[in-house]
Amino acid sequence: MGAIYRGFTRVLAYLGEEVAGKPSGRFPVRRAFETLGEDESIQDLLKYRYFTRVWIIQKLVLPRQIVFTFRGSEYWVDRATTAKISWPVCLKASLKSRTSLELLPYPVAFDDVLKVESAEEEPSNPVQWLQDHLAGQSLTAVGLLDAMKKTWPSSATDIRDKVFGILGLLDASNHAFLRPNYAASAMHIFTSLTAHCILNLQHANTFLVNSIDIKGWNKQPSWAPNWTVTDRWPLRRTWNFPTWTLETDELSHVETNRHTRRISARYCLVFSPRYTGSVDQHGGLHLYLLHICSLERLAPRTTATPTVFRTQLGKYAMFLESDVPLDKVVDAESDHLFYIDAHLFFIVRKTDEENYRIVTHVRRVFLMASPLEDGNQRTGPSCCQNLALMANCGDCCVLLLFCGRESLACRVPYCQAGYFREWLQLLI
Amino acid sequence: MFDPWTCLYIDRLLLENAFRTIQRIPSSIVEDRLSNPYLERTYPDLRQRWDTRGAARLRRQIFPALQIVDIIPVLREALGVSESYLAHTPTADLPEHGRNYTRGVTEFFEAFISANSKHALPSDSGPKRDGRFGLSSNDTPSFIVFRFPREDFDWVQSVYFDLLFAGTSRDGRIIDQEKTLGPKPLAWEWSFNSEGKDFIAITQSDPDTVPKYRATVMGRACVYLRTPILEILRRLHDRWWEVEVLKWQACAERVERVRRYEEDEARGRLQDKSLEFPRVPDELDDKQLHTEVLSWVRSNQGFMRPRMAERVITEEEIAGNRRCERQARYLYWPLIRRVGKPPFNWEPRKVRIV
C-alpha cells in the first residue's frame, strides 16, 4: 500500500456530501489549504472521524498533494502550503472545547504539546500526525517507534492496525522484522515489537520502565508495556534524572551537578549498553542482568515522591529511590534487585525456579556502609573499609568504588572530580 | 598450587591456542612461517587447519604480537629455570622489533621445550647483541593470557561475547567487523591447559585494526585498544580486580628498575627504594615461596595504589611483608590492585523474564 500511495501525484479526499457540500454542477473552486477560512474552518474539517483512522494516514502522507473537498470547494495541500497554515490559532479554542475523543479530535499544536508537557498527561491528539505532516515534519523519515507515537491516538478497529497501518510510511529497514500478518495475535505482534526494540534497538530502559504493572501479569509478559491502552502512548514514562536531594541521616546530600554530569558522560564509554539476550517462543525474555541482591523489608525514608527507601544488604545500607511505594509492593521473600547495562535498576519477582517477573523499576540505588556498624556516625563512609556506590547520574550509570585506606571520598557528595578523573584514566 | 583467583597471572601462551587464533593468515605468509622445522614437526596438520584469509597479519603482527608482559615469572614458574637463565631480561637494547625473530623464536622454543615439554612459549624474542637469547617487546601487549577455573567457562564466554558485541552500530546492529573493519579487534581462544584444570584464554588486541574500529564506534561502545582487556580482567579476577595493563614502555621501565635494583643490591647500595620488596629467605623452595607470596598478596588485599605505573612503593606499604622480594614482582602485583569485594557478584546472570 505504501508503494502505491507513494506513487500518486494527488489524492482526493472526499468525505461525503455532509463535508464536501452538494454538487453544484460546476467544477469546484480550487484553493490552497491556507485559505481555508480561519481556525474555525480548519477545526470543522479536522473534527471528522475520518481523520482519526489509522489507515488513512499513509493515504494522506505519502502522495505529493492532498485535495480536500470541503463545503463546495477543493483545498489542496502540499509542502509548499504548509508553512502558511496558522495552526497555533486554533489551539486554545480546541483545547477548551474538547469534549470526547470520538467526536472531537482536539488539535493541539505541536509546540504547545511540548509546553503542556507532563509525561503522564500528554494529550492524545488523533490528528497530530497530520498537523506535523502539514507543518513539514516528515512521518516517513522517523523510526518505527516515533511514527507509532505520533499516530498512536489514531483509532483502528483492530489494534494490530496501529502497527500495520503505518508500516507503509517507513523505510523497510525500520521494520524488516515485522510483516503484516493477521494470523498472528495482537499479543504476538506487540511482544515481538517490544523484544525487537529491547534487544536490537537497545531501548531496554524505555520499555522496561514502562512495563506493565502487577495487575496485568496474567495478560501479557511482564516486561512488555501495556499496548492495549489506546488512548495514550504506552511508553509515556520517560527516563529522566532530575537533580535531587536525598534527605537521610546517613546520606545527607547527593546531587548531580553540572560538573558531575560532564564527568559521567565520559564514563559512559565504559558503561555503555551491551546487554544481550533473546526471546523464546513462549514469550520469555532472556537477559544478562547483574543481580544486586534479594530484597528484604524496605522502609521509606522520605515522604516526597519519588520516595527513598532503605534496606540492608549485609553490612551495607542500601537506598532505593522509586516512584511507587516499594514498602507495599515489594515481596520480601521473592523479590530481587537487578541491574541491566541500560543504566536501569529494577525489581523482579521470582515466580518459580527459573522465571522472574518485573515488578517495577528503581530510579537510583545507593549503597553505603552503615555508619552504625563502623562506630563512627559522623564521618560515615570515610571509615568503612570498602564502599560501593551505584547511581544513575544524568544518562548514565556511575559506579564508584571506595577503599577506606585511601579515603578517596569521605563524605557525600561523592562525586569528586579528581577521583573520577583518576578512575577514568585507569579505565579508558 | 597456583590460585587463579588470587592473582592475575599472565600465563604461558600455548602455541596451540596461538595458532588457532591466528589461523586466518594467508598462505604465502603461512608458507614462509611454516617452513620452520619446529612447527612442521610439532604441528603436522597446521597447514590443513590454516585458513588462507587474513593477509599480512602474520608478518606484521602475529609473531611480533606474541608478546607477554614480563615473561620472567612465567618462565620461572613454568620451568623452574635458574636465575642465570632469567638474566635474559628484556631491556631496551634488544634487537629491533621482529628482527631475526624467526630464528629467535625457534631457538626459544627449542630451549623451552627441552626444559619443559608440556608448555611452549612463543615470543617475538630474538638474539641479543651478545648472542644470547633474549625476550623483547616494545609495544602494548597484544596478547594477554590468563586462566580461570573450568566451572567459570560459561561465564567467561558470556563476558567475551558481551565485549565482542559491544561494537554495535547506532541502530543496535552488530557491526560486521569482517566486512567493514577488517579483522576483529578482539580475538579470543581458549582451551584447557596441560594440566586440564584451568582454561587458558587468549585475548588479542590488534593495534593496527583497533584504531579503525575505535574510530567507527567510539562514543558508542567500550571497545578501545586496552579497554577490552581491562574489562575482561576486571571482570575475571574475582570480579573485583582492577587491573592496569601497562604499556610496554612502562613495563620496560619497571624491568629496567628491577635490573638496576639488582645491580645496586649486588653492590650493596640500594638507591631505588621503589623496588625494595619484602625479602624471602633463600632457603625456601618454590612451593614455599609461592605460598608465601600468596599469603602476602592476600594480606594486602586492601592495598590500593592510585597510579601503579608511576607511583613509588613506600616502605610503609610493604611493612610487615618483607619476605617476598623476588616473588612479589613475579606475581604482577604492580599490575593489579584490589579494592575489596562488593556485597554482590559482579557477574551477569542470565534471567528469564516472563
Image: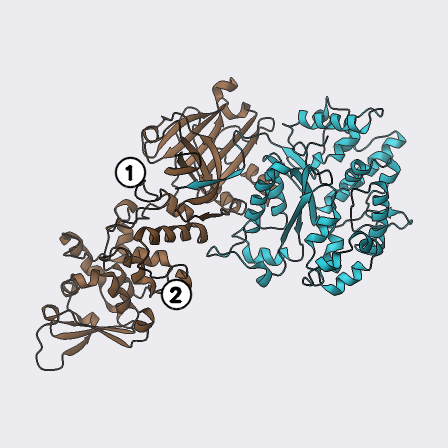
Chain colours: A brown, B cyan
Q: Along the horizontal axis of the image, is A130 left or right of B214?
A: left
Instruction: Please tell me if label 1 and label 2 are on a single chain.
Output: yes
Residue B273 in sight in this render: no
Q: x, y percentage for residue A353?
A: 44, 34
What residue is rendered at 38% in x and 29% in y?
Answer: A309
State whether residue A23 is above or below residue A378: below
Q: Which residue is mark 1?
A: A215
- The residue furthest bottom is A26
* Disc 1: host chain: A
* Disc 2: host chain: A
Q: x, y percentage for residue B277?
A: 77, 29
Q: Secondary structure at mark 2?
A: loop
What residue is rendered at 74% in x and 42% in y?
Answer: B12
Q: Secondary structure at mark 1?
A: helix
Which amino acid is tagged 2? Asp
Which residue occupies the foreground of this view, A41 or A300? A300
Image disc number at residue A171: 2
Q: Along the horizontal axis of the image, is A103 left or right of B354?
A: left
Distance Cα–Cα, label 1 vs label 2: 36 Å
Image disc number at residue A398: none
- Name which of mark 1 and mark 2 comes first in the sequence: 2
